[in-house]
Image: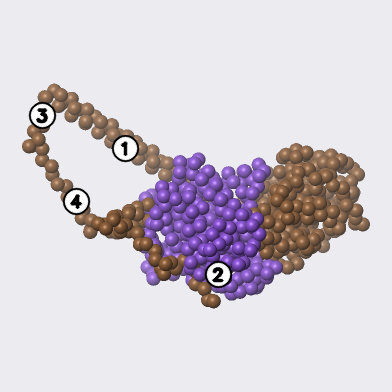
Amino acid sequence: MSKICMFGISGSGKSCYLYAMAQVMNNGVKYGNTKVSIIACDTAQQTMLNNGYNTMAEGKWPPANNNTTEYRFCVRVQHNNRFEELIPSLILHDYAGGIWQNPTAQGAQQRADLLENFKQSSAILFIVDSDTLLKAIAATSPQDLDDSHRNKYVNIPLSSKLRAQQQIAIVENLLRTYKMNNRNVLPPVLMVITKGDMFANKDEVKYAYAYLREKLPSIFANGSGIDAALTTVALGDNLKNDESILSGQLDISIGHHIHIPMLFALYAYLDQVYDGCAPDEQELIDELLPVMRSMFKGKIVFYTNGQQAFAV
Amino acid sequence: MKTYAFVRSRTFYREFDYRLLTPITEIPQNIEEYFSGCVSQFLSDGTEKEDEWDKPAWLLIKKENCLLWGLSIYNRIFSRECDKEESGRTGLRCFCGVVIADYDKANITLPYEISAFQHIFDKTVKFMWKGHDYEIPNVKVELGYSDNNISSSLFSESLNNDENICRLFPNTQDATVLLSACLASKADTSIAVNVIELKQVLGEHVSIRNVILRNHNEKNDIIVDPTKCSRLQDQMETVIETGDNGPDPMSCNKCRRQVTWLDQNGICEDCIRKMKRRRIIVCIFIGALILMGLFVYMREQSKDSVTNKKVNPKEHIQKESPSIKHSDMPEKVYPLKNTKNIENEGGQNEDVQELEHDEIESLPQQNH
């Protein structure tokens, strides 16, 4: 199914990520003789994505989103001088952040719609920002935080830390509910930690990953039966938000892993459709998948059925 | 006549996103949902230029015995305190308005100034700002006082009442005249004034019939649904075909043809039909094979029972079938389906490399 479901906590940076991703993937990501690029199918959407990033480039964070948005992307591949529109129409649903707080019938409908889209998606991207994770870790394991962060996060109000934990617990609830109603089947899930430049060092990243694995047993526990992965992205260095003024250095190079979530979704999609493809298409996929795994190297951690599948 | 607050915005805490803060259960649900959809669309993310949302965009909708009237604007125009949410994002917006049920159609006056809605904002957004209430239903309010008002006047021929047309007016159009004409109209109708972008008034389920766009300088009609439009030939002066009027041509993921309809998997109708046909043929073929196999098996069984022959184990020769050497197989490892954890003698997973501390390169490169 050429669909991706992207959801996450309000304020986790979904929109900013999409704007940056559109720039990175429009330019394309190259490895050896292979280049993968993505453009919006609709010119108006591409313009909107460009405008969003241009706003950031001009030093202003975009405002909060009002609605859930559907994007349509065309995924192209250039491999050994062969150009192919791998997926002419890849749908990405960007869900507004607060849908699981909505206690009304409309909220229930939105959540049902989200779960229905899980079923039709080849991959699920769950976005959580490093600030939320650091607060959640501070609530129970402040010793895991780097010294530079410990004072800051330990001293924030308890309510703030608890709410951070609750946000992640709600996601576990959602995933568990989905699995129970769908015979324990879930498309591959990628946990995308945004604002990665806020982590002090690799240790904090490791603890953040461990925290997510512990709090999301539906996808990471032994016997979960789910393919899941973890990655961290950043839009630049030392980025800060001060009354919506963007300070710091934006960067759309692949060093900040902005391309990884879309490549993951593409990888999951190709894996899913492989058996139904014609022999020549299978041959292309056979060549592409190892290249993509090389592109993942050092940037993503895969788990299958609760076990680390392979390290790249 | 009952007047309720109808406000869409968001509150301080980050997990509480944009929503209808003041739902109304005392009016018909279909009307409330319709108004809610319109208002949600009206607050659509448009251009993010600094001054776009500083000036109000007004919305008036009449539906059956209910009327919606209000404005969308930056929160900070009403209150600086409600400009920034917990994550630090500023530029929060609101639709601040009223729904009037069972209003006097012949004799109604509506305030046409931002200040007349301040008390409604204070009673809703500001009141809920740092609370944990998701919504407050049925908030009754009074219409605010204003020096500038609109009231029912003579019907204007310019006003469009056809639900299948969205009429765009130039920004020089006197909004008061059209608003008053809208109020006077006996039929359901709608008008939006000082709108930034078309997508605020044209959406999947929403179409405002009369629109004064900010940066627009001619009069146009947009067909909203050409199959339903009854005044297509008579009324149209210019037709703008926008992407909202019909589906964009899309490429089928299978045959790559340009089509106007794709299912949720991105496959066109023709391919779906071909796939179904193929599936039926395959099923018939497999069914036939199974039947043949059963037939042969039953025949063999009946032969054996007739001859009462025992198989001599010494005569049972197991032939070795030619096998493909593992080394001849191309290596295909798909971690999401076929990853095997092969244990070597040491009991370690051959396929899994334990990540050492130094090997975790998951932190995006930092240039501290």
Q: Marks 3 and 1: which is nearer the front? A: 3
Label 2 to label 3, Cα distance in Å? Answer: 82 Å
Q: Colour of chain B?
A: brown
Q: Position of residue B243 (x, y in %)?
A: 63, 56
- Residue B196 drawn above or below residue A275: below
Q: Give the residue drawn at x 52%, y 63%.
A: A144
Q: Chain of mark 1?
A: B
Which badge, 1 or 4, comes first in the chain's sequence? Answer: 1
Query: Do the residues bearing badges 3 and 4 touch, measured as CB atoms within 8 Å?
Result: no
Q: Residues within 10 Å of mark 2 (few under 14, many from 20)?
A: few
Q: Which residue is mark 1?
A: B286
Callout 4, which amino acid? Ser
Label 1 to label 2, Cα distance in Å? Answer: 66 Å
Q: Which residue is mark 4?
A: B323
Q: Give the residue drawn at x 42%, y 44%.
A: B274
Q: Marks 4 and 2: which is nearer the front? A: 2
Residue B273 seen in the figure: yes
Q: Residues within 10 Å of mark 3 (few under 14, many from 20)?
A: few
User: SS class of the residue under badge 4?
Assistant: loop
- Answer with the quarter of the image where residue B199 lies: bottom right
Q: Which residue is mark 2?
A: A147
Which badge, 3 or 1, comes first in the chain's sequence? Answer: 1
Query: Do the residues bearing badges 3 and 1 touch, measured as CB atoms within 8 Å?
Result: no
Label 1 to label 4, Cα distance in Å? Answer: 26 Å
